[in-house]
Amino acid sequence: MRTIIEPFRIKSVEPIRMTTAAEREGHLREAGYNVFLLHSDDVLIDLLTDSGTAAMSAEQWAAVMRADEAYAGARSWFRFEAAVRDITGLPIVMPTHQGRAAERILFGAVCKPGDVVPNNTHFDTTRANVEAAGARAVDLVIPEGRDPQSRHPFKGNMNVDALRALLEREGAGRVPLVMLTLTNNSAGGQPVSMANVREVASVCRAHGIPLYLDACRFAENAWFIREREEGFADWTPLAIARELFRHADGATMSAKKDGMANIGGFLATRDERLAQRERDVLILTEGFPTYGGLAGRDLDAIATGLYEALDADYLRYRIRATGYLGEKLLAAGVPIVEPPGGHAIYLDAARFLPHIAPRELPGQSLVAELYRVAGVRGVEVGTVMFGGRDPATGLERPSPMELVRLAIPRRVYTQSHIDYVAEAVIEVFERRHALRGMRFTFEAPTLRHFTARFEPLP
Ligand code: F0G
């Protein structure tokens, strides 16, 4: 088989400023070893997130120029609405400035205190918005989804028996909606199968509960279904996406992922009465319903980007790039979440640095070292992000998994960049015994990972 090449040429380039390990060591110290606090000019390969970091295409930039900035009823809005309706089949579309705004409006409208919202795995803003509405966020991913080494093809699937049991226990009246996150970001960017979507939808229907998709990476999920699920090999990604959404009553979307845009999102539904209430909040906090929190040019860039994300050549390259990095690391013995996910490789810091206890923040130590050695910025998805203090003892409660995410921006890096990342990780892996843990020198009471400061343990 030939190399799967990047299915694009580069027309506009953004220089990377080279730095030395000694310089980066200084930057790390100034940033309190928190890579969120670095200047991005000091980063060589930025794998902090795949969100809002995509390179837009010539067609998207052309759409930006063609856009209509009218306050109400802009041409850009009608293109946006038509694209979302065409792909999702959801008739009512509300534009938002990004995914979490859609979440806040949705959960604010449907949740009451004491409610329970099941998801395969809530993303952190999703969980925070459920909780802000007074409800409880429950993760019901299948057991394989919590095992970094299980090679289940659809590790993002929801445990349907656990969902049934939850509905029995809580009563349907306490569950305003069920959500499925495609792909399951927090548990490794793992896909959900069509069979699982159908089964969850049928349980929801039987209980009269709406099913929502957190559709951030719906196109990548569609590609995995095509590659891995029987019966879909000759479907187009668009047809698979339509079939996924056909089972849903609504969706939240961050267009910063598979919208191929740098900002934007939407909330979509089939429920006109609910939409009426949501629109009131939309106007209050985002903007008039034909622009939400977005400029006309953003709406147009997304309308074009949603289709580009579904292009088969693009998806083949996209999923291959991630798999390629994962396979290189596995071949060198580096522990990662297997199989490689869609948008990111997750290093398993617990197995990478078994000599560093979870309370000594192995993931943070690994993130800092990757930056110091090679200028590669990843992000800790472990105790720093999901742990917390026991209110009684003040002791750290470790997260069940200690991961480091290397998220791959869309259409930004080439194969040689990916090779460089693999070399850097392998270099750190070879001298992993020299790494030490870290401790907090500052932590905010909520979402502490963004602003925390650390120091290496002696
Ligand atoms: N849902 C999922 C599954 C996400 O991954 C994100 C964002 C959101 C919702 C919220 O969207 O950022 O537009 O408000 N994930 C980014 C990440 C931030 O790095 O994974 P947003």
Image: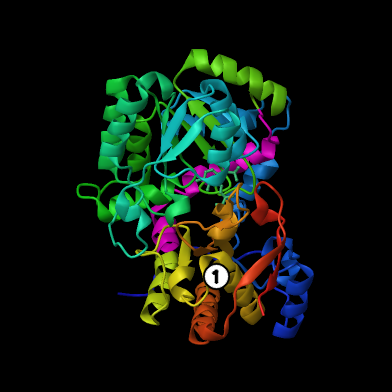
Are there few (<14), some (14-19), or many (20+) residues within 10 Å of tag 1? many
Residue 172 seen from this side: yes
Q: Residue 308: horizontal and vertical position, in percent?
A: 49, 49
The amino acid at mark 1 is: Pro
The secondary structure type at the circle numbered 1 is: helix
In the rendered view, would you say 24 is above or below 70?
A: below
Q: Tell me which segment is drawn in magenta.
A: 291-319
Left or right of 398? Residue 295 is right
In the rendered view, would you say 285 is above or below 393?
A: above
Which quarter of the figure has residue 78?
top right
Q: Does the numbered disc 1 mark a residue whose Cβ is under 8 Å from ligand 1?
A: no
Q: Nearer the viewer, residue 213 or 438?
A: 438
Query: Magenta span has 316?
Result: yes
Q: Residue 147: horizontal and vertical position, in percent?
A: 34, 59
Q: Residue at x 41, y 51 (%)?
A: 220
Q: Residue furthest left?
A: 230
In the rendered view, would you say 230 is above or below 17?
A: above
Name the residue carrying label 1: 362
In the rendered view, would you say 179 is above or below 231?
A: above
Q: Residue at x 74, y 65 (%)?
A: 38
